[in-house]
Each structure stands twice: as C-alpha cells, then as structure tokens.
Amino acid sequence: MNRPILAAIVTQNLKDNLNIVKNITNQRFVWAVIKANAYGHSIKSAIDGFSQADGLALLDLQDVHALREMGWTKRILLLEGIFSAHEIPQVIEHECNLVVHQFLQLEWLEQYLSNLSSLEAENFKSKVEIWLKLNSGMNRLGFKSGEYGLAYNHLIHLGFKVHHLTHFANADEANIFPTVEDQWAIFEHTTQWMDGFKSAANSSAILNSPHVHADWVRPGIMLYGASPTGKHQDIAHLALKPGMILSSEIIAIQEITKGDTVGYGSRFVAKQNTRVGIVACGYADGYPRHAKEGTPVWVHLPSPTDHQSGVKVGLIGRVSMDMITIDLTTIPQASIGTKVELWGANNPIDDVAMFSDTVGYELMCAVTQRVPMKVL
C-alpha cells in the first residue's frame, strides 16, 4: 500500500472560479495566470480548468511548449518576457504575447528583426503581440512613465502591435503607498493617447477596484480558491472553491498522560491525558515546518446520514519531515486509517497559512513531487 497522502486537483472547481471572475468583471477578457506550475496545480489541470479563459499567462517557454503540445490554441502571455535573444524563435513558433519591460529586450527584438527578410519580419510581427509594461510604483519590472512613450513609439515604428500592462503593489491594502489609485492615475495618464488593450487588475484589484478592470484582467490566486489578502473571510462570500485538496490519513495513535511531551524538541507538553494522532504528512511533502500549535486539521468522521462530516482539531508538537501530530482527545472515534484534510474544502488553505505566518500562495506552490497528484 502506498503512503496515504494525496493532492487532489478538482478541475470543476477551477472552472467555477473562472466563471466567478468573468461575472465579477462583466465578462472582461481574462488572462488566467498559471505560473509556478499553475500555482502547484499542474499545467494539465490549468488547460482543463481554464479552458474558457481568453489566454493563459506564465513565465517559462518550457511551459509554453507543453501548453501547445497539450492542445492549447488560444493566447499565451509571457509575463516576464524573454530572458535572452535566443528565445525569440520559440516565441514566434508558439505565437506568444510578449511582455517587454526594459530596453534590453527591445534591443533584442530590433536586432533579431534586422537579420530577417521582409517576409520573415512580417511573419514575426503578425504572430507576436507586445505588452509594454509600465512601472507605476511596484518598482520591480517596467519602464518608468518618462521613458514609456519612447519605448512605445520605438515598438510601433518596428511594426509591432502594442498593448499596455502594469501591476499593483498594494491592491489588497487600502492605505499603503502606492495605492491602486496612485498607480492607476499614472497608468492612465501615461497611456491615454496610445492604442492597444490595457491590463492592470490582479486578483485583489478584481475584487476591490472594479474601475481598474480595463480590457484584460489577470487573476491568479483567486482562480485556485484562495484569498489574495491571506484571509479566507475576505472571499467567503464569493463561493470560490479550492482547486487543491491535500489529504492524508492517521497512521498511528498514542495515548499520553499529563506531563508527557510530543515530537522533536518536546515543544508540546500535555496538560492532561491526551490522545495523539500521527498523520502521514510532513515538511518533505510541503507542509510548513513552522506551523504553530493549533494549526487546523480537518478529521473526516462520516456519520450514517452525512458521509462528508468531520471536525477540526489542532496541530500539536513540531512538524517533522514525514509526520505531523494532532490532538484527538475530543474525538475518540477517530482511528488508524481515518482520513484527514490538511487543506481544501473543509479546511481553507488560508487558515492553515495564517497559523504558519505565510500565505496560501506559498503552501500550494510548495507541495513537493513526492506527493501523488490526482486530477479529478
């Protein structure tokens, strides 16, 4: 028998989440962001789950090739553009939309064009559309406002079709500079006379700032059923569903008495007689080693009338490489083989992340290769 841990990917939930995005944005064009192996959900799941998206946005040409091999025929956006001029032939082959965020990338494009025949150059420009990135205050990638027009005019002169893109630093925080309003004002002012589509709204801006939805939105974390703020209560009203359900089983039980300790470092000391469940999941599976005592784990306790019933209990002791320990004192009916949900429909990933001083993004991306994945 295989170790019982499993990451189940529910593609229908991904589809439902995409429909929620489309409804919120009044059917705007959607780039479904699938970087980092679709936030740990797999590229194959992304194709199935986001089949109704208008395009998929990611980072790596290796993933672009996989998408095309799997039959994706719609738009693909390379969010960080090319990393060297040697990648341009693949960009053309796969007909990518390409972010340009610095002059070096522009120089690569110009130099490559100069070595093509007129027919080859026209083929290039007919297959590749440019998304020029404005640094409106995030200060990672993008042209500053004062140089943006120069880059835009240069690309237009080269004959490319050019669109416009920026990224918000604090769309999930209302009063931190730069605010959405600050960045949107810069974006609007800089691009006001330019042709092309505009895209600015990530998950937080989709939820909180409908006036910046523009032509294309770029949802990421909300497509996978987690909150961009890290707080599940902020999205509970939307009925977003988890794309990933990480589950395992209780593999052993210990009965300890007051004063006994549990795990490495003896961090947990029993204040009373305690029933301890040992679960097949640890930091080598991607579960956060720094998860605190009380981190919720949902224990499946089916009843004759409700086969999906269960109860949340708390983590005790330190997370080890292959196991965690949970307090089963209040549920004596739990036994070896009882299923548990580490995160998913009954135990939101954001709640687990909060107890681990991180965010749902990190947890779903951190699930390791040794965890079997099943696409539902």
Image (cartoon, rainbow, N blue to C red):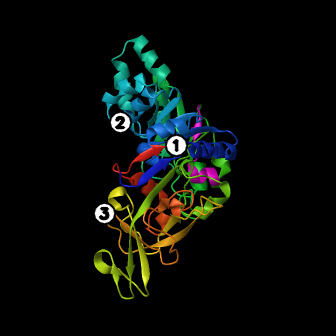
Task: Residue type at mark 2: give it.
Answer: Leu
Q: Label 1 neighbourhood size at 10 Å, few (<14), some (14-19), many (20+)?
A: few
Which structural element holds mark 2? helix
Which numbered disc, 3 or 2, marks the residue that appears first in the sequence?
Answer: 2
Q: Work out whether residue 142 can be spotted.
A: no
Graded by Cα atoms within 10 Å as few (under 14), some (14 to 19) or many (20 or more), the crowding at tag 3 reads some
Q: Residue at x 61, y 43 (%)?
A: 18
In the image, residue 226 sits, relative to residue 166, either above or below, namely below
Q: How many marks?
A: 3
Residues rendered magenta in the picture: 196-207
Q: Can you tell which of label 3 and label 2 is closer to the viewer?
A: 3
For the residues labelled 3 and 2, say whether their Cβ atoms are less than 8 Å apart: no
Residue 159 lies, with reference to residue 24, above or below; the image says above
Front: mark 1 or 3: 1
- Front residue of 255 and 232: 255
In three-dimensional space, the C-alpha distance between marks 3 and 2, rounded to whole angstroms, equals: 44 Å
Residue 12 on image: x %, y %: 58, 43
Q: Is residue 328 magenta?
A: no
Instruction: For mark 3, give the secondary structure.
Output: loop
Where on the picture, by quarter, is residue 60? top left
**Residue receiving disc 1:** 376
Residue positioned 35% across, 62% down in the render: 282
Look at label 3 and name its amino acid: Met
Identified by mark 1, the residue type is Leu
Q: Which mark is residue 321?
A: 3
